[in-house]
Image: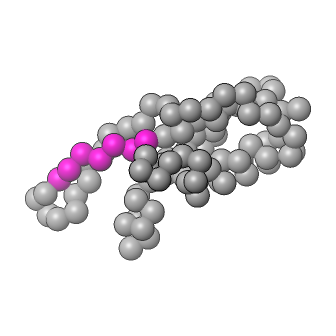
């Protein structure tokens, strides 16, 4: 039941790439906070690989999430809102 433990959320993804950097987003649980999410480590690893270890975070904050339908019991659906955090970075 890995999906239950992880909350069925996506990990970190590079959603925008430029010559000098880009934007990475990751899911987080608002009650726990974006800074302690395990996906934050994944996001920073993506940035680190993209920039060869030399980067600067330009801006970060909550970005548009998404709503999805989750069925936990047959016939019982609920709408779940995924919260996402974005990190804009520049390679040095």
* Extreme residue in the bottom direction: 1
Q: How many marks?
A: 0
Is residue 17 visible in the rendered image? The answer is no
Tell which of 81 and 59 is nearer to you.
59
Tell which of 30 and 18 is nearer to you.
30
Tell which of 57 and 73 is nearer to you.
57
41 w.r.t. 59: above or below: below
Query: Measured from the top left, where is residue 15 in percent x and y?
Result: 60, 35
Horizontal relation, residue 61 to residue 64: left or right: right
Q: Is residue 78 magenta?
A: yes
- From the image, which quarter does the N terminus lie in? bottom left
**Residue shown at the point (29%, 47%) measured from the top left:** 80
| Secondary structure predominantly adopted by residues drawn in magenta | strand
Is residue 41 visible in the rendered image? The answer is yes
**Residue shown at the point (59%, 48%) measured from the top left:** 35
Horizontal relation, residue 85 to residue 74: left or right: right
47 w.r.t. 11: above or below: above
Query: Measured from the top left, where is residue 87 in percent x and y?
Result: 64, 35
Query: Measured from the top left, where is residue 21 in percent x and y?
Result: 76, 30
Q: How is the image coloured?
A: one colour
**Residue shown at the point (49%, 31%) measured from the top left:** 63
- From the image, which quarter does the C terminus lie in? top right
Q: Is residue 23 magenta?
A: no
Q: Quadrant of residue 88?
A: top right
Q: Quadrant of residue 24?
A: top right
Horizontal relation, residue 11 to residue 6: left or right: right
**Residue shown at the point (58%, 58%) measured from the top left:** 38
Query: Measured from the top left, where is residue 71 in percent x and y?
Result: 22, 58
Part of the protein shown in magenta = 77-83
């Amino acid at each position: 039941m890995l999906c239950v433990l992880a909350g069925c959320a996506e990990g970190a993804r590079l959603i925008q790439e430029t010559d000098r950097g880009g934007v990475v987003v990751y899911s987080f649980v608002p009650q726990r906070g974006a800074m302690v999410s395990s996906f934050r480590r994944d996001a920073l690893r993506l940035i680190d690989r993209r920039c060869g270890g030399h980067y600067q975070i330009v801006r970060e904050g909550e970005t548009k999430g998404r709503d999805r339908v989750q069925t936990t019991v047959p016939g019982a659906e609920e709408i779940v809102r995924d919260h996402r955090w974005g990190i804009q970075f520049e390679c040095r």
